[in-house]
Image (tube, rainbow, N blue to C red):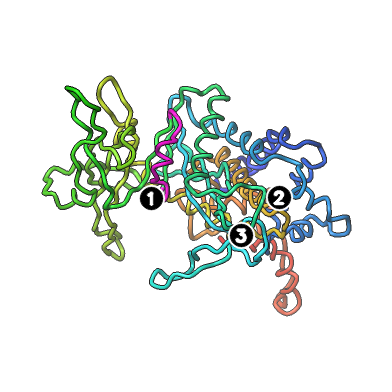
Amino acid sequence: MKDSIKETKIPALLATLMALLEAHRAAFKQARPYWRAVGLVLAELFSFGRHTIAQVILSLGQTEGDWSGWYRLFSRERFEEEQLNGILLRETLEAVAATEPYVVGLDGTQISRSSLKMPGTSWLKSPRSPAFRPGIERAQRFLTGAWLPPLENGYSRAIPLRFIPAFPPKAVASQEPARREWEAGLVYLNWVRLQLDQAGRKEQKVLALADGAFDVLELWRGLPERVTLLTRTARNRCLYWLPQPHSGPGRPASYGDKAPHPAHWLHAGLRNWPKQQVLVRGKWIQMRYQLLGPFVRDGLPERPLFLLVVKGMHRLVGKKKPHYKHREPSFYLISAVQEGDAWQLPYPIETILAWLWQRWELEVAHREMKSGLGVGEKQCWNSRSAVVSVQWSVWVYAILVLAGYRTWGLCGGPPTPAPWWPGAKRWSFNTLWRSYRTVLWGTPEFRPLWLGTGDNWWKKETWLAGLANSVATSVRI
């Protein structure tokens, strides 16, 4: 059974990847840069050390030739990042019906640097320092705009569509304008809306998931039409009820009475907390919530919002080793839509609660992009390549993951080579990388690479076995 799965699914993975690469051909101005880009995509899979340009050239066996052409792919205008990712977005549309929401996620991240002169670098708060003693690091700041495929058994996956620079004003000057994270998020949302409109999906709605860093008045105010924002908010956010209908002379009131802070509702004596079973990563989780409003924020009277209060959890989990799992309460603001004279939720509450859990997939993508594909490791220093090389690596990650999703879905990947473990319900990134390498090396099994010839193999032939299998076994199971 395992052999049949590998024979039917693994070759399809490579065919899907090549079809996706061919679809992006129009983003490159000439054929030569395109084929150089195809070689770099495959070289990223073959590089097990740092993902510098020198390392990927070495994995292709091109170190004896001129290296400058590989660097010019990033330092010169061989392709446009926005056009390249526009094609990527259109390739995702076949997985989402026009009647369903197109779900995207927003999150900021940092690329650590050591240079004080690299364009876009500045001193930022270090994410590796402890909370009780925060530190700083030299880094570039980017906004990750990702697409989240439709839920499958409670799973989704963040596939980055844009990696937009969000360099602060005090950063080293670059070709990119200075932006805050929320400004880069607004650029991304407007870009997604424009791409969908140009693809003939003007009626399709967009659902954007974000953390508390994007709960900013200017972002709410500049939100494009047919885009719903679902973002975390502070527990002490100042909210107001909608004003009463105006009658009589004078200007209508912009605000109603001041509403309690979001955290107040946890202790307001509300006895009726609705319960909803939500399928999250293959498990049913009961959520207790309160949907309140609509409200308006201080300084934003023209955009009503709903407040969603999700109660914390303290439950017993585990069968072999039972233990309690604790989760703090959380608070969210959701764009309200007007239907007649009333304000309504843009989606059913079941849909909103199910998608709340999926924003964490962007954090998972950040971890794998940096540790698995070495985003930010390419040694490119001029004002263009210092940014484009990072965006390129993110695009490579996105197209590799999208090919895996097209081939297997979210929960139909191949089995692991370990006989004692069938694998997770959702295929892992290690399974994806190993599958690509298995196809490209033409070796579906590890052991046939070397066969022992006698009882003294451990004396004479161990080093041969290690050399033969070192490449294949370099990917952890």
Mark 3 residue type: Thr
Mark 1 residue type: Gly
The extreme top residue here reads 340
Secondary structure beneath dot 1 equals helix
Q: Is residue 327 above or below residue 136?
A: above
Q: Depth check: 307 or 303 in front?
A: 303
Q: Which residues are magenta?
A: 211-226
Residue 212 circle label: 1
2 or 3: tag closer to the N-terminus = 3
* Disc nearest the viewer among 3 and 1: 3
Residue under pointer 2: 384
CB atoms at circles 2 and 3 under 8 Å apart? no
Q: Residues within 10 Å of mark 2 (few under 14, many from 20)?
A: some
| Image spot of residue 118 (x, y percent) | 67, 60
Q: CA distance from mark 3 to mark 1?
A: 24 Å
Q: Determine whether, in the image, residue 64 is placed left or right of residue 174.
A: right
2 or 1: tag closer to the N-terminus = 1
Q: CA distance from mark 2 to mark 1?
A: 31 Å
Q: Determine whether, in the image, residue 406 is placed left or right of residue 83.
A: left
The extreme bottom residue here reads 459
Is residue 155 a member of the stretch shown in magenta?
no
CB atoms at circles 3 and 1 under 8 Å apart? no
| Image spot of residue 356 (x, y percent) | 36, 44
Residue under pointer 3: 121
Residue 155 circle label: none
Secondary structure beneath dot 2 equals loop
Q: CA distance from mark 2 to mark 3?
A: 13 Å
| Image spot of residue 326 (x, y percent) | 28, 60
Mark 2 residue type: Arg
Residue under the point 50% across and 66% down: 126
